[in-house]
Amino acid sequence: MQSNDCAADEQAIRDLVSTWMSATRTGDRDAVLRLMADDVVFLRSAQEPMRGKAAFAATQDALAGADIDARSEIREIKVIGRYAYCWNHLTVVITPRGGKPVSRAGDVLSILRKDDDGWVIYRDANLLAKPD
């Protein structure tokens, strides 16, 4: 049986994922940045790790003006004290201005940390690839 604190933490993490998806669709980069730790690390397939909010923000600047449709299906959340993990399946379609849509889909495993202001993404392993 799940404790009320654990259930509340799981809901807060679901809300974080929902906010991330919504902010991504509307292009609200600042809202997305508030959902991650300053020392966040993103592990990406066949690329060097992306370290810190500034590096993430720079990648978002490159997408300015593009339409981004991101959808997440949470598969599992586990809270362990101040840390938690969230496994979800992510589908992203990026349509640059005047360009053709680019689709990616795959699993994402995020490690979250509970700070004074709530849950933030601390580490993220992203396995997105072109769909078959």
Image (spheres, rainbow, N blue to C red):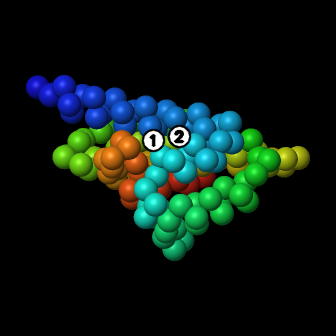
- Quarter of the figure with the N terminus: top left
Name the residue: 48% across, 46% down: 35
Name the residue: 85% across, 47% down: 97
Image x and y of residue 121, in percent: 41, 51
State the mark number for residue 11. Answer: none
Do the numbered discs 1 and 2 sit on residues whose CB atoms are within 8 Å?
no
Q: Which residue is mark 2?
A: 20
**Nearest the eye: 97 or 130:** 97
Kindly state the secondary structure of the residue where label 1 is placed.
strand
Mark before the other along the chain sequence, 1 or 2? 2
Name the residue: 19% across, 46% down: 80
Name the residue: 33% across, 47% down: 116
Q: In the displayed orientation, state which residue is furthest to the left.
A: 1
Q: Amino acid at mark 1?
A: His
> Distance of mark 1 from mark 2, alpha carbons?
14 Å
Q: Which residue is mark 1?
A: 89
